[in-house]
Structures are given as structure tokens and as C-alpha cells.
């Protein structure tokens, strides 16, 4: 299991536009065979604070996601609307 958590701060004037672009990317990602979960979360007290919680089968599935046309479009068009973006990777601890 490969988990990506992305903490995003959107420039306040871009929130609505960004969320539309993000919704398109998330919907397409959820259809990928290696994507198990893709959640878009918003701070109810601060609409410019977004968190993505993405779960993929493995790192290869995430790498495949990054090569898709919808992801490349999201990076090109939506990321410039951000004030900041921090990505963290997690993997399951084997028992």
C-alpha cells in the first residue's frame, strides 16, 4: 500500500477555481485501476486549506497516476493557483 497525503494552501482568490480543477483530477484518478481511494478534504473553518488523501496499490501505481493526462493537466493548470503544497508518503507497516 502506498499512501500520499498532500497539504495544500490555495491562494484565497483561487479557491473555487482550484476546487473545480481538483474535482476533475480526483474523479479521473478514482477510475485508475491502481487507485484505491482519493479523498479531497477541506477545512470547514478555512476554505483555502485542503488535504488530499490518496491510496494506491503500490508506488508503481502512483507513478502511473503521475503520467496520466488528467494529472499532467492538473499540475500545469491548478498548481499555479496554490500558495503552498506539501506532500508526504506513507506505507503500511508489515506485521
Image (cartoon, rainbow, N blue to C red):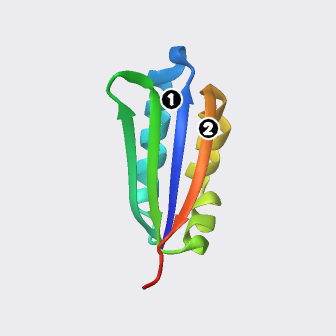
Secondary element at tag 1: helix
Secondary element at tag 2: strand
Residue at the far top in the pictured view:
13
Residue at the far bottom in the pictured view:
95
In the image shown, does 55 or 61 lie closer to the viewer? 55
Q: Compared with residue 82, is residue 30 higher up or lower down, i.e. above or below?
A: below
The image position of residue 32, as x and y in percent, is 46, 65
The image position of residue 26, as x and y in percent, is 44, 49
Mark 1 Cα within 10 Å, few/some/many (few <14, many 20+)? many
Q: Earlier in the sequence, mark 2 or mark 1?
A: 1
User: Would you say 31 lies left or right of 70 here?
Assistant: left
Question: Which quarter of the rendering shows the C terminus?
Answer: bottom left
In the image shown, does 17 or 56 lie closer to the viewer? 56
In the image shown, does 26 or 37 lie closer to the viewer? 37
- Quarter residue 23 falls in: top left
- What is the C-alpha distance between the residues marked 2 and 1? 13 Å
Say which mark, if any, is on residue 18: 1
Residue appearing at x 61%, y 26% in the figure: 81
Residue appearing at x 59%, y 34% in the figure: 78
In the image shown, does 20 or 7 lie closer to the viewer? 7
Residue appearing at x 55%, y 71% in the figure: 61
Numbered circles on residues, count: 2
The image position of residue 82, as x and y in percent, is 61, 28
Q: Mark 2 points at which residue?
A: 85
Residue appearing at x 53%, y 46% in the figure: 6
Mark 2 Cα within 10 Å, few/some/many (few <14, many 20+)? few
Say which mark, if any, is on residue 54: none
User: Would you say 77 lies left or right of 32 here?
Assistant: right
Amino acid at each position: 500500500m502506498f499512501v500520499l497525503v498532500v497539504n495544500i494552501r490555495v491562494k484565497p482568490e483561487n479557491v473555487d477555481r482550484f476546487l473545480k480543477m481538483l474535482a476533475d483530477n480526483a474523479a479521473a484518478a478514482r477510475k485508475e485501476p491502481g487507485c484505491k481511494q482519493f479523498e479531497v478534504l477541506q477545512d470547514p473553518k478555512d476554505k483555502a486549506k485542503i488535504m488530499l488523501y490518496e491510496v494506491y496499490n503500490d508506488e508503481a501505481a502512483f507513478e502511473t497516476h503521475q503520467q496520466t493526462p488528467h494529472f499532467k493537466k492538473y499540475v500545469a493548470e491548478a498548481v499555479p493557483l496554490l500558495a503552498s503544497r506539501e506532500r508526504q508518503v506513507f506505507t503500511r507497516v508489515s506485521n
